[in-house]
Image (cartoon, rainbow, N blue to C red):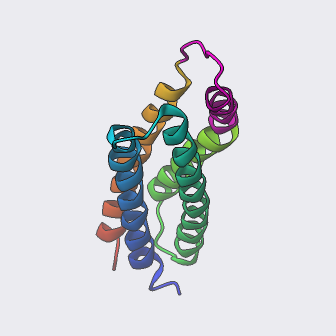
Amino acid sequence: MSQLGHPVGAALAFVWLGMVLAVSVLEAPLKFRAPGVTLALGLGIGRLVFRALNIVEVVLAAVITVFCAAAPSTTVWVWALLGGLWLVLALQLLALRPRLNRRTDLVISGADVPSSSQHLVYIALEAVKIVLLAVVGVVLIASIP
């Protein structure tokens, strides 16, 4: 497994990157443009899609971490990048998602919810995650012996 650590880690980082781009950049904004999709319906769909994505993200982060741990040539830079990915995931899943879910519940129930910057913070963290995943993938490819 040590010889496969960086190639598998790089491949998984790029798979993860593709998933984030497909869901966060394409699906999330486009679903609200579909005919007949109300704000409440779009938020309900988004909640399901992002819950599934987040579960897969945690699994991919764990598997990439395990493969990098098994590769003896994993550098401190790779560990710093992986730590950054784990931090972004933790902020999104533990700090923002519960708050966004509460707001979504209110909107779906018909409540008039004041504007909030939490969604913009989530989007900013998605942008950071996209950059980190691209860099992790490239660094891991470059470190293949």
83 left or right, relative to 145: right
User: What residue lies at 35% left-to-right and 55% top-to-bottom?
Assistant: 22
Residue 69 percent location from the top left of the image = 58, 71
Nearer the observer, 95 or 39: 39
Position of 86 relative to 74 (above/below) = above
**Count of number-bearing discs:** 0
Nearer the observer, 97 or 71: 97
Per the image, is 24 magenta?
no
Position of 16 relative to 12 (above/below) = above
Residue 121 percent location from the top left of the image = 50, 27
**Residue farthest toward the top in the current orientation of the protein:** 114
User: What residue lies at 66% left-to-right and 20% top-to-bottom?
Assistant: 111
Nearer the observer, 21 or 75: 21
108 left or right, relative to 14: right
Start and end of the magenta stretch?
95-116
84 left or right, relative to 110: left
User: What residue lies at 64% left-to-right and 24% top-to-bottom?
Assistant: 110
Position of 58 relative to 68 (above/below) = above
> Split into 4 quadrants, where in the image is the C terminus?
bottom left
Per the image, is 106 magenta?
yes
User: What residue lies at 57% left-to-right and 71% top-to-bottom?
Assistant: 63
**Residue farthest toward the front in the current orientation of the protein:** 36
Q: Dividing the picture into quarters, in which one does residue 102 lie?
A: top right
Q: Main secondary structure of the magenta part?
A: helix
Nearer the observer, 134 or 51: 51
Residue 59 percent location from the top left of the image = 60, 66
